Amino acid sequence: MSDPQQPTFLVSAYSDPVVVKINGKANYLNCNSFREFIEMIIANGDRHIFIDFESCKGMDSTFLGILAGTAIKLRKLTPAGELVIGNLGERNYELICNLGLQNLLTVSKGKTEPAENFAALQNQEVSDAKNILKAHENLTEANKENVAKFQDVIAFLRNQVEKQEKD
């Protein structure tokens, strides 16, 4: 297992729903493996995902954007899928609601522990401006009120992406 000081994403990929437990903070420094895992399971046909926030100590806008993008992608599938989040502490629930994501994904109010067998994802830093830009664009797609909140970040990231593409 990984260093207890290091945030981890524990996954139960073969359960229904697929379950992800977040330990520590979920942010741009460690969410790339989470994003890749989510993309892989959706591509493999999984439509129901539960994310357990009981041990999550906080999250940033990049991670929240990945959640928004996942919920949007699942809703567009036929048949539609669902992203459920649960065991949210007060602060994490507040972060979800401040960006209007509670209208896009399902917030479970009860204590949920639906899976038993977990494996840890290896943390990988998201250093790619394209992925961070996409996460923030997801937030503006999820809730138009987020445009004003993230317009400067998005403009900065678009400039970074354009510079990288020219080099």
Image (cartoon, rainbow, N blue to C red):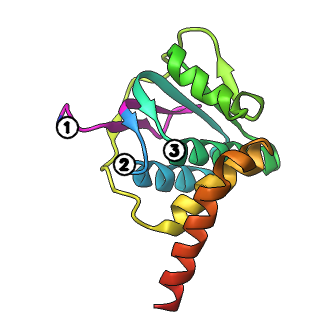
**Residue 10 forms part of the magenta stretch:** yes
| Residue 77, position as x, y percentages in the image | 78, 50
The residue beneath circle 3 is 63
Give the Cα separation between the discs numbered 1 and 2: 16 Å
Specify few, some or many for label 1: CA neighbours under 10 Å numbering under 14, 14-19, or 20 or more: few
Q: Nearer the viewer, residue 70 or 11?
A: 70
Dot placed on the residue nearer the N-terminal end, 3 or 2: 2
From the image, tell me which residue sits under label 2.
30
114 on left or right of 32: right
- Amino acid found under the numbered disc labelled 2: Asn
Residue drawn at the location 73% of the way across and 48% of the way down: 148
Quadrant position of the N terminus in the picture = top left
- Report the amino acid beneath label 1: Met
Quarter holding the C terminus is bottom left
Q: Is residue 80 highlighted in magenta?
A: no
Q: In the displayed structure, does residue 85 sit left or right of residue 146?
A: left
Along the line of sight, the residue nearer the viewer: 127 or 51: 127
Q: Where does label 1 land, which residue?
A: 1
* Placement of 52 over or under 66, stated as above or below: above
Residue 58 in percent (x, y) is at 43, 30
Which residue is drawn at the image coordinates 36% and 48% (left, top)?
Answer: 30
* 3D distance between C-alphas at marks 3 and 1: 22 Å
**Residue type (three-letter) at the residue carrying disc 3:** Phe
